[in-house]
Image (cartoon, rainbow, N blue to C red):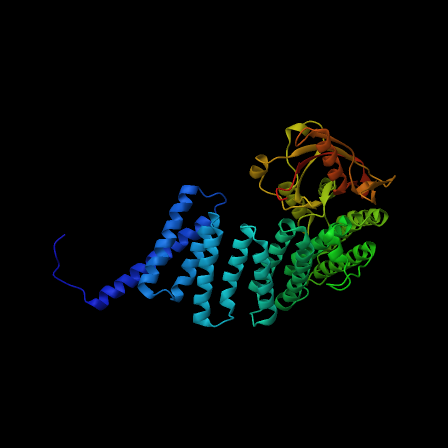
């Protein structure tokens, strides 16, 4: 290329270098963001991206200095690459350096530092350093509680994220800390609801999934209290740090009534709409019937199921649509609150039902259940993609569900009503093939709750198959 004879001055060169660096940063950060969405990054590619992250941080450091605020985001991305490659200690050091820069730039406590704190929690959790994770989680909770933060939908998302971290801790941390995580998640869920009341208003439909989130957590707390281990003692403690405990039945009963109150709030949301949503109200009653069943109140549940069936018909739904939705049993509690039969049927089709060759041609309902934690085997985890399920270890179980409360069974020190749990269970395909494993599977099956099949609002006996995935965590 011929020389133009024009030599740019030092100022132009500096400007071009800054523009070039900014473009490189933008392109690289976009590529890193896309990369973090990958579920199983190739090791070689991950190493290459880590090298790119290091080069970018070094380039910015050379250009603007080691304490430049321009380093905060690239360092966060570098730490993310390190976490993906299980280099947790180095990731922590990188995040600490980014935090120090942020404090030098903005002050000791600022809202902009929250993403870095959350990333530190993620890094510790991935590295199973729950002691350090708890320290950061407590600090973040203190930050939200004592510092000035913007009250908006982003705060709700942040509180949900911290609550989810505590739920993960309840499944993965030491048993001695499970009660702590469960109580913290409960407190955060109330904070989420309170914040939503301020942001959305008490009658806004966006509150519904947040109310239902706490309802699901109450069921988890119920399982913990009835487990009678160390977490149960923590949940029954009258005053934290004291040795005085409430009776387990009293605690469980309190969860039951608080759950009914949450369902009343959900129902009132649909009642308060400019045009009242009759179907949404009826669906809230359906979940209330499930709630009674989960707490071993079968007679009240039976009456409510009949009432709901009629209410849905009065809401203008076709009889065939209602009958089709209730033609198979469901695992309860459901993973989400659905304000309509159409949405509930679609959600069940994607999350629970699966065509299994073992049940083909036998007219059996086929359900999928994944343990949330081995310590809470009756609590379902949000379903994974079927492609992921197909590669996992699972057992295949057949069972019956009664259509009426003919008798009760004694399971793990408590009476379980027959209409909400399986009987005549059999292991079609076991995990390990030994008798002990089969017996444990049948005990786990007996602790799962089901909403029975309905016909015309009346409970019916049914047969079903269950694809059972054990928890991957200890």
Q: Quadrant of residue 239?
A: bottom right
Q: Could you tell me which residue is drawn at 64 percent across and 36 percent down?
A: 354
Is 132 on the left-hand or right-hand side of 294? left
Is 390 on the left-hand or right-hand side of 223? left
Is residue 311 visible from the viewing direction of this image?
no
The picture places residue 252, in percent across and down from the top left corner, at 79, 55
Q: Quadrant of residue 380?
A: top right
Q: Could you tell me which residue is drawn at 81 percent across and 56 percent down?
A: 253
Number of numbered discs visible in the structure rendering: 0
Residue found at the very far top of the displayed protein: 361
The picture places residue 249, in percent across and down from the top left corner, at 83, 54
Residue 420's place in the image compared with 157, above or below, is above
The picture places residue 188, in percent across and down from the top left corner, at 65, 62
Q: Could you tell me which residue is drawn at 72 percent across and 30 percent down?
A: 427
The picture places residue 171, in percent across and down from the top left corner, at 64, 49
Q: Could you tell me which residue is drawn at 36 percent across and 51 percent down?
A: 52
């Amino acid at each position: 290329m011929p020389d133009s004879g024009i030599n740019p001055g030092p100022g132009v060169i500096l400007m071009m270098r800054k523009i070039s660096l900014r473009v490189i940063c933008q392109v690289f950060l976009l590529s890193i963001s896309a990369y973090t969405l990958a579920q199983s990054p190739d090791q070689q590619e991950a190493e290459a991206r880590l090298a790119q992250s290091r080069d970018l941080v070094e380039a910015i450091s050379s250009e603007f200095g080691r304490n430049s605020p321009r380093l905060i985001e690239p360092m966060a991305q570098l730490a993310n690459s390190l976490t993906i490659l299980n280099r947790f200690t180095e990731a922590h050091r990188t995040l600490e350096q980014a935090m120090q820069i942020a404090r030098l730039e903005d002050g000791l406590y600022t809202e902009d530092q929250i993403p870095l704190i959350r990333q530190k929690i993620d890094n510790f959790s991935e590295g199973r350093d729950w002691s350090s994770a708890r320290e950061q989680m407590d600090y973040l909770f203190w930050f939200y509680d004592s510092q000035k933060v913007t009250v908006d939908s982003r705060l709700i998302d942040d509180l949900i994220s911290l609550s989810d971290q505590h739920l993960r801790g309840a499944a993965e941390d030491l048993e001695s800390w499970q009660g702590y995580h469960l109580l913290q998640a409960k407190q955060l869920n109330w904070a989420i609801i309170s914040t939503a009341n301020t942001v959305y208003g008490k009658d806004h439909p966006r509150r519904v999934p947040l109310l239902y989130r706490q309802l699901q957590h109450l069921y988890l707390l119920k399982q913990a209290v009835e487990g009678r281990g160390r977490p149960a003692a923590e949940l029954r403690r009258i005053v934290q740090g004291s040795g005085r405990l409430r009776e387990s039945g009293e605690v469980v009963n309190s969860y039951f009534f608080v759950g009914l109150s949450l369902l009343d709030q959900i129902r009132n949301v649909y009642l308060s709409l400019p045009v009242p949503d009759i179907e949404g109200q009826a669906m809230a009653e359906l979940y209330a019937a499930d709630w009674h069943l989960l707490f071993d109140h079968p007679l009240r549940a039976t009456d409510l199921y009949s009432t709901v069936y009629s209410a849905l018909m009065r809401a203008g739904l076709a009889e065939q649509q209602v009958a089709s939705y209730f033609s198979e049993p469901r695992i309860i509690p459901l993973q989400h609150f659905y304000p309509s039969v159409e949405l509930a049927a679609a959600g069940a089709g994607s999350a629970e039902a699966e065509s299994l060759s073992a049940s083909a041609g036998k007219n059996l309902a086929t359900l999928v259940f994944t343990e949330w934690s081995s310590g809470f085997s009756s609590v379902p985890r949000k379903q994974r993609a079927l492609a992921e399920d197909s590669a996992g270890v699972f057992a295949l179980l057949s069972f019956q569900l009664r259509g009426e409360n003919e008798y009760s069974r004694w399971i793990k020190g408590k009476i379980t009503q027959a209409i909400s749990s399986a009987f005549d269970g059999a292991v079609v395909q076991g995990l390990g093939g030994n008798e002990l494993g089969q017996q444990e599977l049948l005990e786990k099956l007996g602790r799962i709750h089901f909403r029975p099949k309905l016909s015309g609002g009346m409970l019916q006996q049914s047969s079903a198959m269950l694809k059972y995935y054990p928890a991957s965590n200890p």
